[in-house]
Amino acid sequence: MKVNMNPISNSARQCSKNRIKSTQRRTSRNIGIEVASICSRFFLKSPHLHYGYWTDDLELDISNLRIAQENYVQLIISHIPEGVRRILDVGCGSGQIAKTLVDVDYEVDCVSPSHYLSEKTRELLGQASHIYECYYEELQTEKRYDLILFNESFQYINLEEAIKKTFGLLNQGGYVMICDIFKKNTPGKSPHSGGHSLRRFYDIVSEHPLEAVTDLDITEETAPTLDIMNDMLNEVIKPTADLMQQLLDNRHPVMSKIVKFLYRKKINKLNKKYFSGLKTGENFKKFKSYRLVLYKKTSVASAWQLDFTNAHPGTAGSKSQEKNKVGAT
């Protein structure tokens, strides 16, 4: 009889592999965000990392991206309920939104897993805020907050864990505001990655004592940002990469062939993902829903009394918000 002397089971090995892959994805994501921060500051003269909010009177031009991003920040601030004082900014980027909130007299703490961005945030905020340099799921604190803000960071956190963690960190009657991308139930493969399923999000939220206050569909106003980025990819980055490839072919032809062969799958994947010309605003609107949602933490007793048919997230009993739910099903 053959005895398995290896104490590590196949399931344990698989769990270990999954943890390694998860860590690698997180590391890659953090590096990507850090690079985006550097490029945004240098090339776009913008300290922001999020989408822009494009109003009808704002020309769609890269020179106006910073204005659109500042419009976005003001939109968030305008939806903060009265009585909120202490805010937790989850995935704060370089701290720009937190700084704006501090400047209008909110008390703001931040969560950031990136050491580079945490340092930038500390430089910006000084002693005004506490920076939790960790992943949101790992956050340990005795503090409780009036509002927890997810600005394009909610999509990176496990849905159930995010809701459960947030509920525990909120004061009674506190709020959670999410301004982020969600997936619509549209057939086909989206050229744009990211976002939790909008339908599943609504289902998970309905299982918790959270009352819908606002559900605003801002897909039309944010989608033009993708057209700006798509143009940059195909009119600046792609031609530059092609010229560098030509230079390598000319100077080091043998090395160039080896690199192309060894990394052909990754090169093809990158070309398909970023330079297909499909990462447009129209495709974004087809497959994604960009929403600003606000929920209030209620008591368990109050939650049992809620009529989720009339107060389902996205409706809050109003016809205008019912219209905003289009695309969730």
Image: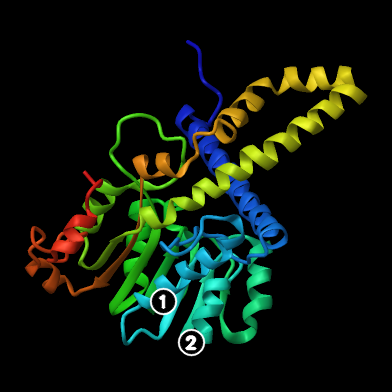
Q: Which of marks 1 and 2 is nearer the N terminus?
A: 1
54 w.r.t. 203: above or below: below
Depth check, front residue: 21 or 46? 46
325 w.r.t. 67: above or below: above
Residue 313 horizontal/vertical position (percent): 20, 60
Asked if one can make out residue 4 in the rendered structure from this viewpoint, the answer is yes
Where is residue 214, by image quadrant?
Answer: bottom left
Q: Distance between the residues labelled 1 and 2?
A: 9 Å
Residue 91 horizontal/vertical position (percent): 51, 63
The residue that appears at 54% across and 33% down in the rendered structure is 277
The residue that appears at 65% across and 76% down in the rendered structure is 122
Depth check, front residue: 321 or 160? 321
Marks 1,2: beta carbons within 8 A: yes
265 w.r.t. 137: above or below: above
Where is residue 324, by image quadrant?
Answer: bottom left
**Considering the numbered disc 1 on the image, is that residue within a helix, a strand or a loop?**
helix
**Disc 1 residue type?**
Ile
**Considering the numbered disc 2 on the image, is that residue within a helix, a strand or a loop?**
loop
Circle 1 is placed at which residue position?
77
Circle 2 is placed at which residue position?
104
Q: In which quarter of the image is the C terminus?
A: top left
Residue 312 horizontal/vertical position (percent): 15, 59
The residue that appears at 85% across and 22% down in the rendered structure is 249
